Amino acid sequence: MKINWKVRLKNPVFWVQIAAALFVPILAYFGLSWEDMTTWGAIAEVLKRAVQNPVVLLSAGVSVFNAVTDPTTCGICDSSRAMTYTTPSKDSEKV
């Protein structure tokens, strides 16, 4: 699995995707919303329950996998162009 991890780890969007990929399946499974997470104790309790539940772990794992893979390439590797980046590309076309 050739992924340019150095560049991905520098990209704040990647971290938001990973956080959402972990927390959204957990909140959905337990029927909670962001408003239910008002204390660190509540977050810790939900995470503890999530780690003990194989369905939640599998759902979160699939979500993280989806956030990591690049759907514009064949397989689960980054493109050869993306492998040459040293920082996240600021390349964007305006439509």
Image (spheres, rainbow, N blue to C red):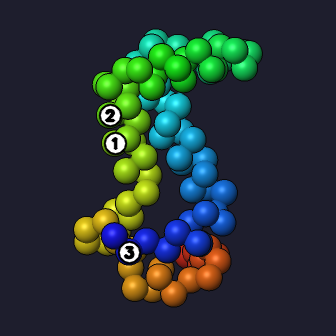
> Quadrant of the rendered structure where residue 75 is?
bottom left
Q: Are marks 1 and 3 in contact (CB under 8 Å)?
A: no
Q: Amino acid at mark 3?
A: Lys
Q: In screen coordinates, is 39 left or right of 11?
A: right
The tag earlier along the polypeptide, 1 or 3, is 3
Q: Residue 73: image x %, image y %?
A: 32, 72
Q: Are marks 3 and 2 in contact (CB under 8 Å)?
A: no
Residue found 61% across the figure and 55% down from its top: 13
Q: Residue 78: image x %, image y %?
A: 39, 74
Q: Amino acid at mark 1?
A: Val
In this view, 54 is above or below 49:
below
The tag earlier along the polypeptide, 3 or 2, is 3
Q: Are marks 1 and 2 in contact (CB under 8 Å)?
A: yes
Residue designated by label 3: 2
Which class describes the residues within 10 Å of circle 3: few (<14), some (14-19), or many (20+)? few
Q: Which of the image's four quarters has the N terminus?
A: bottom left
Residue designated by label 2: 58
Q: Kindly report the distance in space between the C-alpha atoms of the residues bearing marks 3 and 2.
A: 23 Å
Image disc number at residue 62: 1
Q: Kindly report the distance in space between the C-alpha atoms of the residues bearing marks 1 and 2.
A: 6 Å
